[in-house]
Amino acid sequence: MDPLHLRSAGTSLVIAFNSGEAEVIHWGADLGPTLPDLAILGDAIPPSAIDANVPTGLLPQGSSGWQGRPGLRGHRIVNGVPGLDFSVRLRVMDASFSDAGRLASADGSGSAVITQADPDAGITVTSRLTLHPGGLLELRHTLNNDGDSPFQLDDLATVLPVGRDAVELLDLTGRWARERHPQRRAVTQGTWVRTGRHGRTGHDSSLLFAAGTPGFGNRRGKVWATHLAWSGNHEQFADSLADGRTMIGGSELLGPAEVVLEPGESYTTPALFAAFSDRGLDGISEAFYSWFRSRPHHVLPTASTGLPAGKPRPVNLNTWEAVYFDHNLDTLLELAESAADLGVERFVLDDGWFRGRRDDKAGLGDWYADEKIWPNGLTPLIDAVTSRGMEFGLWVEPEMINLDSDVARAHPDWIVSPSAASHKDGGRLPLEWRNQHIIDLVNPEAWQYIFDRMSALLSENNISYLKWDQNRDLLEHGHNGKASVHEQTLAAYRLFDALKEKHPSVEIESCSSGGARVDLGILERTDRIWASDCNDALERQTIQRWTGLVVPPELIGQHIGPTTSHTTARTHDLSFRAITALFGHFGMEWDIREAKGTEREELKRFIGLYKKHRDLIHSGRMVRADVPDDSLNIHGVVADGTAGFGDGSTAALFAVVSTRTSFADRPGRIAIPGLDPERNYRVDAIFPAPGDADYTHTFTQVQPPAWLASGAEVTGSFLAEVGLPMPILNPEHALLLEVTVA
């Protein structure tokens, strides 16, 4: 059987079948259209080892001599006896391609389906691989039980090999209000595993798991990276063997006997998305962004064009940090009036609108407007918002329930319990988390109730947007006494899908006590994520930078918070908060009635800047400079096809950000990469500018660089190789640069 060779956007994937199983020969840099005879790759066999070449299997297995982490773990249960067929010997039965030939499309991108089976064990695994046009690889396996007895699946992993020169690992860490911070370590012999047992993706989940060449950075080095598109329990790992091979990948983390396949039943893994770049982490982002933006449903595309570019992302105002649970119609009408005056386009009413919800101890599950607060329902507020030209959005938390709620009192059997007996019959409940429990969506009646209530809210009210929260881990999560995170996650997916089908024009934000459910599984069903409950601009610089490694800015909610942060008590100027929020789906979450005089005018101006540049921000290439001084970061968005822009067109928008004091008394010349090296550009500092309220607080220099007031005209190569002398920024301040075609 001829090898499979898929090529796209500088990436090649080669799978050979000479060993009898699907063997990954290469995943990395493009090899060109022609492959040699792969028989030359027969490896040396060392002493005191198995007397055969051990393939790097698409599904590594002990029956081929693999001594690392296996791709499949499970066993058959025959007449009540477990442990049989514990080691399968999968061999290729078929390999088919999406189109004729070995290259599925003109650019080499395409799909393949590989079937491997062990007839003696009664197991078939079908692997589906797609190399998308932007270079992002998508891989998933489906295991089918062909036998006549149950097969208990313990693990089915999706893995890929990385180059021998990948000697450094990068993954992400986190906690509430401090999500997605990087950590690095050397690749050493053994297995490095990041485990998520939260029942949701988790604040500490590594959005990306990457291996690369020494010191790989934003725009330098080779990088191999994976992401597991799953919103439940999971593992991500790097497995480095004694023979020098390293695999990276991930799998759903299954609970005890959580998946037992009866004869004829099957299980499909979450998709593993993988990208290779020889241009550092920015190349990884480009592959993911290309995939996101090519989706037909990406940010609600308009029917007027055949393009996947969705409607402009509206300026949001969220009421949470303005009023919390203190819902008063007069106050909210004042906020709506103030928002409309500023140019806000969507007004989102947060937690506290439904029955009994005066704090976080009651009401979850009773999805009716509280008649004491809203005697006429939400209509007066919705009408006031929409009459001022804004969309109306509403906070909900459908997957959760308070014991102090009408629905919990009526249906205690709908509350998730680890016990075989329900709460109704005296079964034990998990520990409370934020005074709440979980509604059992695996129960068909509970699922239907939640769907009906959410659908009724959308049908009975002019709601364009749901902020969908999920404020606790799924600890001791069971259905009828059995572990059920797997089924709960699928039931939640079905809930999103069903509501989207019935209400296709409604946008949904995935919020999970901030950023605890950020993954491509949930993002297939939602229109943006809330990156963190922390609106502190300094914290957000790191959170947003690393979230944006995978998720494009149009899908990341980024808000200007109050002058003094409610989560950290830090105080920041408006310019720093606003520039931080700009490079995403922009909004505000504070009592904007407090913004008066010059501050209000500055806020209006910044909202105007977002509206002017949002098409660029939400369609361009993300560029992150490698800056020697780690107290500074330079990031921005560059328009694709810059060379085709006419004179005066905005080609890029960059932020220069000072996060702390520098070791040097002046920053010197800082390179600005990513532009067409042959093109002439004009660079202007546009925010804060002389006369802005925050201008004097931003800089600490006696004399500014000469170009700062009048702009500079330079080539793209000059900007990338020489750069411009930067002003001396005070710590926790930022400068916004506009780059236009000269």
Image: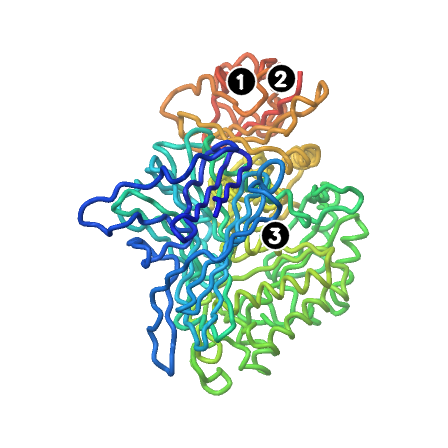
Q: Specify the label residue 681 is tagged with.
A: 2
Could you tell me if the residues under marks 1 and 3 are in contact, i.e. CB atoms within 8 Å? Answer: no
Q: Earlier in the sequence, mark 1 or mark 2?
A: 2
Could you tell me if the residues under marks 1 and 2 are in contact, i.e. CB atoms within 8 Å? Answer: yes
Q: Which residue is mark 1?
A: 719
Q: Specify the label residue 168 is tagged with.
A: none
Which residue type carries mark 1? Leu
Q: Residue 230, how many percent across, how many down? A: 50, 57
Q: Would you call the spot at circle 3 few (<14 residues within 10 Å), some (14-19), or many (20 or more)?
A: many
Q: Which residue is mark 3?
A: 322
Q: Residue 173, how many percent across, how many down? A: 40, 48
Compute the Cα span from label 3 to label 2. Answer: 42 Å
Type of colouring: rainbow
Q: Earlier in the sequence, mark 3 or mark 2?
A: 3
Viewed as shown, does residue 470 lie left or right of 237? right
Q: Would you call the spot at circle 1 few (<14 residues within 10 Å), some (14-19), or many (20 or more)?
A: many
Q: Earlier in the sequence, mark 1 or mark 3?
A: 3
Compute the Cα span from label 1 to label 2. Answer: 9 Å
Asked if one can make out residue 564 in the rendered structure from this viewpoint, the answer is: no
Q: Residue at x 44, y 43 (%)?
A: 225
Of badges 3 and 2, nearer the viewer stands 2
Q: Would you call the spot at circle 2 few (<14 residues within 10 Å), some (14-19), or many (20 or more)?
A: many
Of badges 1 and 3, nearer the viewer stands 1
